Amino acid sequence: MKSRKVIVVGASSGMGRELVRQLAARGDRVAAVARREDKLAELAAEHPQQILPFPHDVTQPESVPELFAEICRQLGGLDVIIYAAGVMPEVGATEYSFEKDRSMIEVNLTGAVAWLNAAADRFQNVGHGTIVGIGSVAGERGRQGQPMYNTTKAALKTYLEALRNRLSKRGIRVTTIKPGPTATEMTAHLKQTGMMGAEDAAERILRVMDSGKEKFLKPSHAIIFAIIRNIPTGVFRRLKL
Amino acid sequence: MVSGADAFVFEPRTEADVIRVFQVARESGRKVALRGNGRSYGDANIAEEAIVLDICRMNRILEWNPETGVLHAEAGVTIEQLWRTSLGDGWWPPVVSGTMFPTLAGALAMNIHGKNAFHAGTIGEHVTAVRAVLPSGSVLTLTPADDAFYELISSAGLLAAITEVKIQMRAVASGDLRVLPLSIANWDEQFAAFESLADGADYLVSWIDAFASGRSAGRGLVHAAWYQEESGARPHSLREDHQDLPDTLMFGLPKSMMSNFLRPFNRRGGMRLINAAKFRASRTLGNGRPHPDSLVGFSFLLDYVPNWRNAYQPGGFIQYQSFVPKEHARRVFAEQFRLAQEVKQEPFLAVMKRHRPDRFLFSHAVDGYSLALDFKHTAKRHDDLWRLCHRMNDLVLAAGGRFYFAKDSTLRPSDVTQYLGEETIARFRARKAEWDPEGMLTSGLAQRVGLV
């Protein structure tokens, strides 16, 4: 397979970091974008020829156009962009924190739109490219536990679907990944067992990222969430999910 | 037409501007891709994140000598400008492509051929001098006496930027050709017609129905054409108004609307019908009866329908052209059609021509035939189409055939190494190291096939 030029936003931990590692290991050139410079430096040191670190805070979307252009210049083009940045602060059952909710909107959604719009504009001009957004099964329904996390992932799913509908005829693939519960820094506070490892998730993402579709990473999730999507609202409310 | 790149376009007007573009590229750490009028079908005139040096604004005719037929022009001059300058004086470009819009720079970078390739060769064989700017800023002039002349021409814009050209035009007594259409029933008749007509005809080309199979495989329509003698000091046929293509096609339909009209038919079923109808019509309409046609009308078929490429939107199309020695051409071309039919990806247009070898570095020519195929491209069947092309490449390579960078989107590095040969590639690299040691000149094509 030919070496590709890839941007991974949200590369300092979790699935983003594993994606960078695995892309670099198979010979791709990867621009790793994240806020924490020390983590980026560690990651880049693993494959210095393949990984280019770019410190960036996704809550500063106004800096994206210039950085995006510079990354494309240094990579010598762009074939794939993966938006993997995401936050899910712990939210109490009776808590309504605007600050926490705004941080989720900024990182999970506004940052995604800033980066993926830039990529979509470039890809539509050149007629090729793959856009990957890391969504979530949490975007399937409005659950009680994480109102804004669910909302941002539902919005991201809809945004990516719209990009797919716009761009697929031009040969551009837009893929939405719904990983399901995955053990990362972001989910550490959930204390959930049986979660998929980030390494495993990244492997599965790389297998489906050029599909240009919405993808669950486990076949069982497709069935479970088809059922969850179709549970009547009144019943769903009483399930305390 | 499925390639694209995000880059910075510079449009120099003078040779000094060209030198400055190389300086800017060096200062900004970017590569340079050379571009004429963008008439190559693939990725030869673009490169991601590069500076694209577009030569189109260097488009002055510097000197025209109607006595000798030598024309000296800046390299952004198009083939259209050539004939409009010279035809009134009884001269015609010695080699033209199927469209009049390529620039001289692009035509020489790809060393284009025309329907007279079997006796006139490629355009480079008619150039008497060429001036070029090296990435270092040095300027050199080459003539056919220089070995480097044969390397610069055909090198796909990877060695230097051609800025001026002197070309020997061909004398013609009339602006019309005598054209003979011959309806052809199968492959055997195709090759028999070419071999019997090649000795006397000035132009030879054949359209082939790529959907036909079995005993009808290879059916189509050959057109042979001859220059005409015409009495009078300045025949009317040499005037531009005689040559200009009409604004309307059949039934008074404006040509500008044709691509919209074609789009609904631009699918497999529609094209099968159109190809079959064209063949049926060829059996009777004008078959075997010579008729006059203007040089422009006969030569630039692609220009009859403006923006005909739009009929392939939104997915675009690729052109695939392979060149096969005459002893293997029938077998290879028939097998290419069979493979395309097997995967239900028949080319919507297929055109065969006769060629002769030349001595240029990246020569596409062979003592044999070429088959140019237009394939519709869709995102859904992209991988299938590339797989088909690679299978067709294997057939061509096994037969000692060649390819043409102006019409390529699918070649792999191994294909190029095999058809050009290690020696040719070593020669290219040696010249590249001498003229472009920083490796500034690049293109999507060159990166894809491993030439840079």
Image (cartoon, coloured by chain):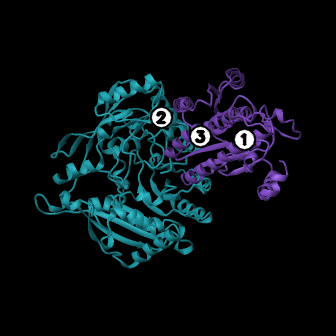
Q: What is the number of callouts on the image?
A: 3
B152 with respect to B131 (left or right): right
Which chain does the numbered disc 2 sit on? B
Q: Nearer the viewer, residue B193 or B9?
A: B9
Q: Which residue is mark 3?
A: A113
Q: Which color has been applied to chain B in this rendered view?
A: cyan
Q: Nearer the viewer, mark 1 or mark 2?
A: 1
Of the image marks 1 and 3, the number of the one nearer the N terminus? 3
Q: Which residue is mark 2?
A: B442
Circles 1 and 3: CB distance less than 8 Å? no
- x, y percent for residue A187: 80, 35
How much space separates mark 1 and mark 2, taking CA atoms?
46 Å
**Label 1: how many Cα within 10 Å (few below 14, some 14–19, many 20+):** many
Q: Which chain is purple?
A: A
Dot 3 falls on a residue whose secondary structure is helix
**Label 3: how many Cα within 10 Å (few below 14, some 14–19, many 20+):** some
Q: Which mark is residue A149?
A: 1
**Could you tell me the amino acid type at mark 2?**
Thr
B346 with respect to B158 (left or right): right
**Could you tell me the amino acid type at mark 3?**
Val
